[in-house]
Image: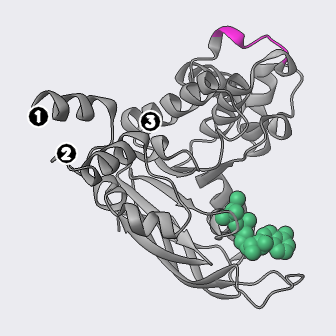
């Protein structure tokens, strides 16, 4: 079984919700081990609600979520599920618990009851893999947003997860912080085969995904490879979503009569295409 996550017919409603819209309304999703999945969707489309189902913060009202073979409704498995599918949130300040970087990264494995020698090793390798080892003795509050998010990611890696779920981890960061975080998660995916579920409203961050999932009103309304999703510019605009800058530019150039490829996502592809013109 190579599906690390299975979401089966999931419905979720918040009790206090005023509208009769369901936050999740029949979501089905299989994520393979090692896959890099990006979820996009307008505000309120259900992205955060879905992500919280993937590590048992929320339980479906209807349907099931299975993580590494464990049902999130199985109370006995909750900690194993959370260790398996670690979660990173938007605000870097809310995720730091330690007063020293090292201590912060050790927090997760300590809670798993891992022995001190092994924790020491894990803290070191985790900090190295997010490129924050040289900051190990620093106070987290002195770090930049991008650095704090990388420390938070190290804290998750130290628990040896199969999967990391990131709910708009770059939303509060400046462009260089965003790049640091994106490069880190790409590297963890490629080099350590960690499955990534990345929620973002920056379309550029979705260009290299294996698959993009588009949500609207609690449903998955579009999914596929970046080129297949982003070439549907009109449909995305209807969903109040942007496309990558270069895709937008190609779309506008085509509208003005230039016979340029429509499946352009990156600057490099745009340059290639224009030079051949
Ligand atoms: P997204 O992350 O895509 O912006 P959310 O999953 O946060 O979407 O929200 C989906 C729907 O659920 C929205 O209609 C939102 O208003 C509602 N919702 C989200 N969180 C809560 C909550 N804690 N209580 C009540 N309603 C909520
Ligand atoms: Mg959200």
**Real-space Cα separation, disc 1 to disc 2, in angstroms:** 9 Å
Q: On the rendered structure, is 25 left or right of 189?
A: right
Does residue 56 appear in the picture of this structure? no
Mark 3–mark 1 CB contact (< 8 Å): no
Residue 118 image label? none
Identify the magenta region: 134-139
Q: Nearer the viewer, residue 237 or 29?
A: 237
Does residue 92 appear in the picture of this structure? yes
Of tags 1 and 2, the one toward the viewer is 2
**Real-space Cα separation, disc 3 to disc 1, in angstroms:** 32 Å
The disc, 3 or 1, on the residue closer to the chain's N-terminal end is 3
Q: Which residue is mark 3?
A: 186
The residue depicted at 37 percent of the width and 36 percent of the height is 190
Is 137 contained in the magenta span? yes
Q: Which residue is mark 2?
A: 258
Residue 277 image label? 1
Q: Nearer the viewer, residue 277 or 158?
A: 277
Mark 1–mark 2 CB contact (< 8 Å): yes
**Real-space Cα separation, disc 2 to disc 3, in angstroms:** 34 Å
């Amino acid at each position: 079984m190579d599906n690390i996550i299975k979401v089966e017919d999931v419905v979720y409603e918040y009790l206090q919700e005023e509208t009769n819209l369901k936050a999740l309304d029949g979501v089905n999703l299989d994520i393979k081990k090692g896959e890099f999945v990006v979820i996009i969707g307008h505000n309120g489309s259900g992205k955060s609600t879905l992500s919280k189902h993937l590590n048992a913060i929320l339980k479906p009202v209807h349907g099931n979520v299975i993580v590494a073979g464990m049902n999130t409704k199985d109370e006995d498995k909750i900690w194993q599920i959370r260790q398996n599918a670690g979660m990173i949130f938007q605000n870097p300040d809310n995720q730091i618990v330690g007063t020293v970087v090292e201590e912060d990264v050790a927090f997760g494995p300590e809670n798993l009851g891992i022995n001190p020698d092994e924790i020491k090793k894990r803290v070191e390798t985790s900090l190295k893999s997010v490129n924050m080892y040289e900051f190990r003795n620093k106070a987290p509050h002195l770090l930049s947003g991008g650095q704090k998010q990388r420390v938070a990611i190290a804290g998750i890696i130290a628990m040896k997860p199969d999967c990391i779920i990131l709910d708009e981890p770059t939303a509060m960061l400046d462009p260089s912080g965003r790049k640091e975080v994106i490069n880190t998660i790409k590297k963890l995916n490629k080099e350590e085969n960690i499955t990534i579920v990345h929620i973002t409203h920056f379309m550029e961050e979705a260009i290299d995904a294996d698959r993009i999932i588009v949500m609207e009103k609690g449903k998955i309304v579009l999914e596929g490879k970046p080129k297949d999703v982003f070439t549907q510019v009109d449909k995305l605009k209807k969903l109040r979503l942007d496309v990558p800058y270069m895709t937008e530019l190609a779309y506008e150039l085509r509208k003005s009569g230039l016979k340029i490829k429509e499946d352009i996502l990156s600057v490099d592809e745009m340059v290639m295409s224009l030079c051949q013109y």
